[in-house]
Amino acid sequence: MEGERRASQAPSSGLPAGGANGESPGGGAPFPGSSGSSALLQAEVLDLDEDEDDLEVFSKDASLMDMNSFSPMMPTSPLSMINQIKFEDEPDLKDLFITVDEPESHVTTIETFITYRIITKTSRGEFDSSEFEVRRRYQDFLWLKGKLEEAHPTLIIPPLPEKFIVKGMVERFNDDFIETRRKALHKFLNRIADHPTLTFNEDFKIFLTAQAWELSSHKKQGPGLLSRMGQTVRAVASSMRGVKNRPEEFMEMNNFIELFSQKINLIDKISQRIYKEEREYFDEMKEYGPIHILWSASEEDLVDTLKDVASCIDRCCKATEKRMSGLSEALLPVVHEYVLYSEMLMPILSVCFNVKGVMKRRDQIQAELDSKVEVLTYKKADTDLLPEEIGKLEDKVECANNALKADWERWKQNMQNDIKLAFTDMAEENIHYYEQCLATWESFLTSQTNLHLEEASEDKP
Amino acid sequence: MEQAPPDPERQLQPAPLEPLGSPDAGLGAAVGKEAEGAGEESSGVDTMTHNNFWLKKIEISVSEAEKRTGRNAMNMQETYTAYLIETRSVEHTDGQSVLTDSLWRRYSEFELLRSYLLVYYPHIVVPPLPEKRAEFVWHKLSADNMDPDFVERRRIGLENFLLRIASHPILCRDKIFYLFLTQEGNWKETVNETGFQLKADSRLKALNATFRVKNPDKRFTDLKHYSDELQSVISHLLRVRARVADRLYGVYKVHGNYGRVFSEWSAIEKEMGDGLQSAGHHMDVFRGYMCRYASSIDDILEDEEHYADQLKEYLFYAEALRAVCRKHELMQYDLEMAAQDLASKKQQCEELVTGTVRTFSLKGMTTKLFGQETPEQREARIKVLEEQINEGEQQLKSKNLEGREFVKNAWADIERFKEQKNRDLKEALISYAVMQISMCKKGIQVWTNAKECFSKM
């Protein structure tokens, strides 16, 4: 379903098609295949890491999978699009469709909260039915994210919308906030569904299908997320000092994350500001048209002209409204999601597992390994035990490295695609807006000229 | 130079009649003769007549503005702007123009000219001056009179003012106007020597008349209402337009910020060395488009300022309309008062003659108290009254005539004004549409190019 078959599908967005070997017929820099193979490589790596039978669907074409030939981080520009493989939303290949809608308010004696309806449609065999409908609240999403991070500490888990909006919220549950959150939650679940590994996570399945009571009893199993995380973070913090061999490629990743985080935050601020300015422009324009109508009441000879101007202005007003809503549908949520992603990617802000945390974990493992090696060199005792332990740790490190790298590549690919699409969308919205306004005013002008010609011909004897 | 006024080459119509508005011409004479002049306005007769100030067609332009310092009346240093007025006469045969006069004037001199015209041509809707201080500003425009954009727009407004006068069939023949264009020194003294300030109606008197007049011509009452409405609606429109301009500016300028982000990003992309095909290059191109988009708003809004100025002119015309209405009310009130006075004198006379006292009078009271007057005294009084009544009747007749002439002439000019207004406003609205179209076309171009950038990345 994924992997090779996807690689050979021409993506629907009009981007140059990526062949199975990662060749792109047009545009893009000429990087032969390495990025393409990385996607497939990831599958292979995950196979080893997760040991799940479901991954049989991944192609085992040996010619494309060579772990040893996996090249480290390409010394190329992060945003060069070389392979146009799309991982999500190929309609004929998806077998899991999720929607989040119908927010509903629930009032109890203790609290008020919102639940969202989640509808899942699937053709997968492991699901008992082909359609599910459940209601979940934000807390449940938080739980799911935590479980995913626990289970896949080296993967990039999609971000959840913020718990609270920091600035300017009077009411916790106003309509805009709920709608924005709903859209983000929808995105969250779909990202998981599209992730080659996370989509088969058991907790995810339970989240989508279990009844309320089933979910709460399931939640009670296993140690609390926070305690687990807390332990690891503490352990990581103490092990950080001992890290010696941090690979080069992760430094580059680190730098990229910092740069990206800076940029995406700026873009987010700018985009929000544009929306705000457009809204204020719209508010003023609403008043502008009606004044001309008012005026027409005292001008006998200019009535038609003034009324026509008023209607043109009103139509442009509506076009502005549409442009605004386009912005809030496409660009704003996408950019904001990546702001959240970048926050996860940066060590400072996150509480949960993040890539850096993942790297720390990997480093921790590495540190363990290093210390073991030291011990080995200085202590000749327990020689039988240590090599085995070292071996295990080496494997662990290798797996963590590769899993992260692969997911990182996938994430970057998606990011490039998404940002590009979002901006293309914004450009289209603007084009459409101006085209509409142009048509409005041109037809006004034509009608005025025609009127003038009519009048002129009437004057002639 | 000839940007804002819709009719850039308004040319003087040489008058077939004797030029009026010389300092000694009485108001009555002016009214009488101009009645005929008004009818001639569209004849475009090109005959040269004696006592006409211009023998040929002329062009007027306010071509420059200059900052100056000088000393004012209180001998304090001040800074002001002077405007260069150039007058050219146009040869018929080859259309070439020759500079005939050129002088500098400041805004206060324009004001003086207008004040003079208002007094001497009360039946004319006198063209308004551009605003003294910048109003209806949106945030970018400074309200400072010394701001070059404001000075430039004022220069155009002053030129428009002169052109309006020059194309008015009656005002163009005024001597003071002629001297304004031709006599640099001493012009102020000449204007003041006309004594027009003394001839001006007092505001108090006019206000009084407005309240107390009983039978004004209905057309003028309606006109007053119209001018109030016009003023109110245009003010409102200009206020909202300023706010809309402000917001539009914001939208465009914020997009410029994208440019900066992408340019920084592209620099790093390029460092990683992909050459022309790199995303970095396309980001640079995108940045260029965003910067261009952001700065295009400056030109767009500058054009809109011209549109706003066209509307402002008619905002100020509303006051000129009201001035004509006020004059009518004043004359009508004067007439009513004179009629009332005459009626009461007639009554008094009648009472004296017949001996009956129907109305209360002080004389009657004192007579009652201090005794009747002698027959001789009574005769004397009757004679005086009869004389006064005679005079009064004459005056009433001439006032009546004056009033009717005024109404006729004023209404003729008002009709002319209405047609001018309809033409100008329609043109202004159409030019607004043209501006919007141009803005949309630019927008489509920028965003189409921007979209291409992303598709190439």
Image (cartoon, grey):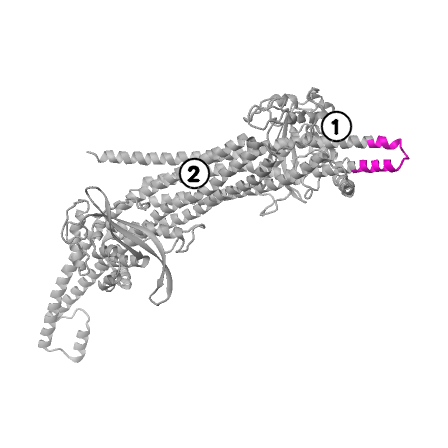
The reply, left or right, for residue B3 in relation to residue A256 is left
Q: Is residue A372 magenta?
A: yes
Please tell me which residue lies in front, A242 or B31.
A242
Examine the rendered structure and indicate whether residue A434 appears above or below residue A15.
below
Mark 2: few, some, or many residues within 10 Å (few <14, many ≥20)? Answer: many
Between marks 1 and 2 in the image, the one whose residue lies nearer the viewer: 1
Q: CA distance from mark 1 to mark 2?
A: 56 Å
- Quarter of the image where one finds residue A117: top right
The segment highlighted magenta reads: A367-390
Query: Where is residue A320 drawn, in percent x and y?
Result: 46, 39
- Quarter of the image where one finds residue B9: top left
- The reply to whether label 1 and label 2 mark residues of one chain is yes
Residue identified by numbered label 2: A316
- Chain containing mark 1: A
Q: Amino acid at mark 2?
A: Cys
Query: Where is residue A299 drawn, in percent x and y?
Result: 31, 45
